[in-house]
């Protein structure tokens, strides 16, 4: 079996793997970040009463909270479902089929967003929940392929290439949709129609480019037959229980995961509140903040490749730490800088400084995310890739409330966005403090993985 397994570091397969980042990033940028929130909120507002209260399945909520509740519910479902799906994938060797299944489910739900019209806010919420849940599930199986397709010494480079392709793909479709949005009047198109078309385009983009991934990724093992009287659900629970019982054997991996929980929440919080900070604190327009998002997508493409190169020079662990130190500096500068109203290059100096700070964020954004993934891939026990990457995804999504809560709490206490954003540095400090105590070589040895130095012999499978 080992001799017949696909060779690692195959350029065609690696390209196919990175194309899934190109494909699914359209959902993050076009759907979640830009178009769906204002469109779905507008439909919810039309369905609300004169006090702005919306009735949803017997509950009364403010119409402008509907989108956030749907996102929160989809994340909560991921916390409970993803580890089970990962366990099923690792036991059954159905990893590729499950990637295909959830990619098709998520992209189809996104295409169907074209049919969200006034009075269909519940349909919109359901499609958002299904799309976001499927997006998270597919990422688990996608990430789990990294140690399969790349040897340890190539995983930083490959992971960085994946994130770079994601920024490029997501940014390109967003740019095309924003151009269409700008030209809608001259084309005789209504705003609502363009918004629905943009949402559907993300689903078509996701599904269409995923076909490249489906055609190039190769399974590593034959599908394992279920024992008599068992189902995928029962073996999944048993596999998950076995992992929880054995997790004490991998203390360094667990420590790294806890560190990631904190510093990644800091990263995600800065991303989430950046646009709010720009408009509310610096007086920038919403249109300008969207252009900043596009700039970040473009620069992050090069930043991801830069950090892949840097990891090859100083090691992924040191490169990751350097990126987190820069994130901390960014937070401090957001607190103390950007105060001057002096006109510079047609804008206030503080707004120009925000552009420069966003440029720095773009460089470190892809690098910190890519190296976090590739480092974790080396610490995963052999044969438990999907399961452990489900924990990784849950750490990213299931705790993403901490940073926004901390920001909101401090902002309420002080009445200042600047003190609110400064509070986020706590997450970076805690994450870095835990991260520097992780013994990466020991974690690799505990997981039964290869070291960074030698290439794995051709033909050695990993699943």
Image: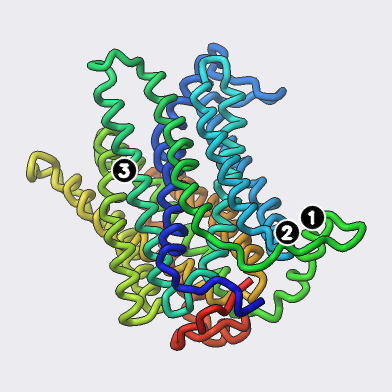
Q: Are marks 2 and 1 in contact (CB under 8 Å)?
A: yes
Q: Which residue is mark 1?
A: 232
Mark 2 lies on a secondary structure that is helix
Q: Tell me the residue that label 2 is attached to.
A: 88
* Relative vertical location of residue 444 with respect to residue 111 in this rendering, above or below: below
Q: Secondary structure at mark 3?
A: helix
CA distance for labels 1 and 3? 39 Å
Mark 2 surroundings within 10 Å by alpha-carbon count, few (fewer than 14), some (14 through 19), many (20 or more): many
Residue that sits furthest to the right in the current view? 229
| Mark 3 surroundings within 10 Å by alpha-carbon count, few (fewer than 14), some (14 through 19), many (20 or more) | some
- Give how far across and how far down residue 450 sits, in percent: 54, 84
For the C terminus, the quadrant is: bottom right
Residue sitting nearer the eye, 397 or 61:
397
- CA distance for labels 2 and 1: 6 Å
Which residue occupies 19% across, 51% down? 353
The residue located at (82%, 64%) in the rendering is 238
Nearer the observer, 355 or 125? 125
Residue 172 - label: 3
Indicate the position of residue 101 as horizontal and vertical percent values: 62, 46
Q: Residue at x 57, y 69 (%)?
A: 257
Relative image position of residue 219 (x, y in whole percent): 60, 63
List x then y, in percent, for residue 220: 61, 68
Q: Is residue 436 above or below residue 337?
A: below
Query: In the rendered view, would you say 4 is above or below 207?
Result: below
Contact (Cβ within 8 Å) of mark 3 with mark 2: no
Q: Considering only order in the chain, which callout, 3 or 1, is on the residue closer to the N terminus?
A: 3
Which SS class for mark 1?
Answer: helix
């Amino acid at each position: 079996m080992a001799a017949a397994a696909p060779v690692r570091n195959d350029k065609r397969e690696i390209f196919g793997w990175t194309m899934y980042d190109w494909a699914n990033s359209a959902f993050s940028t076009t759907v979640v970040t830009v178009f769906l929130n204002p469109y779905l909120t507008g439909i919810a507002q039309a369905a609300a009463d004169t006090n702005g209260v919306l009735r949803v399945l017997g509950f009364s909520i403010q119409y402008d909270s509907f989108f956030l509740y749907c996102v929160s519910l989809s994340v909560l479902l991921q916390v409970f479902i993803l580890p089970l799906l990962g366990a099923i994938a690792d036991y059954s060797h159905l990893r590729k089929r499950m990637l295909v299944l959830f990619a098709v489910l998520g992209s189809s739900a996104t295409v169907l967003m074209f049919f969200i019209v006034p009075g269909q806010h519940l349909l919109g919420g359901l499609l958002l929940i299904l799309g976001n849940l499927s997006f998270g599930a597919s990422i688990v199986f996608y990430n789990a392929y990294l140690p399969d397709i790349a040897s340890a010494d190539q995983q930083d480079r490959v992971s960085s290439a994946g994130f770079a392709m994601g920024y490029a793909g997501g940014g390109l479709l967003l740019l095309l949709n924003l151009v269409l949005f700008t030209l809608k009047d001259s084309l005789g198109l209504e705003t609502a129609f363009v918004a629905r078309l943009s949402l559907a385009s993300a689903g078509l983009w996701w599904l269409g480019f995923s076909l490249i991934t489906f055609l190039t990724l190769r399974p590593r093992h034959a599908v394992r037959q279920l024992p008599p009287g068992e189902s995928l659900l029962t073996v999944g629970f048993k596999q998950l229980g076995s992992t929880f019982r054995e997790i004490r054997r991998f203390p360094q991996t667990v420590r790294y995961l806890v560190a990631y929980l904190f510093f990644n929440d800091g990263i995600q919080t800065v991303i989430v509140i950046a646009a709010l900070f720009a408009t509310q604190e610096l007086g920038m327009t919403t249109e300008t903040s969207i252009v900043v998002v596009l700039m970040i997508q473009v620069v992050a493409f090069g930043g991801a490749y830069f950090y892949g190169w840097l990891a090859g020079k100083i090691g992924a662990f040191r490169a990751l730490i350097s990126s987190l130190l820069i994130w901390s500096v960014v937070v401090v500068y957001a607190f103390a800088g950007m105060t001057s109203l002096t006109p510079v290059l047609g804008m206030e100096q503080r707004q120009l400084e925000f552009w420069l700070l966003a440029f720095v964020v773009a460089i470190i954004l892809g690098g910190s995310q890519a190296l976090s993934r590739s480092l974790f891939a080396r610490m995963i026990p052999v044969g438990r890739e999907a399961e452990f990457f489900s924990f990784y995804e849950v750490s990213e999504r299931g705790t993403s409330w901490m940073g926004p809560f901390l920001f909101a709490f401090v902002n309420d206490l002080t009445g200042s966005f600047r003190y609110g954003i400064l509070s986020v540095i706590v997450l970076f400090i805690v994450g870095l403090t835990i991260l520097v105590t992780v013994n990466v070589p020991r974690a690799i040895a505990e997981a039964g993985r290869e070291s960074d130095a030698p290439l794995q012999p051709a033909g050695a499978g990993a699943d």
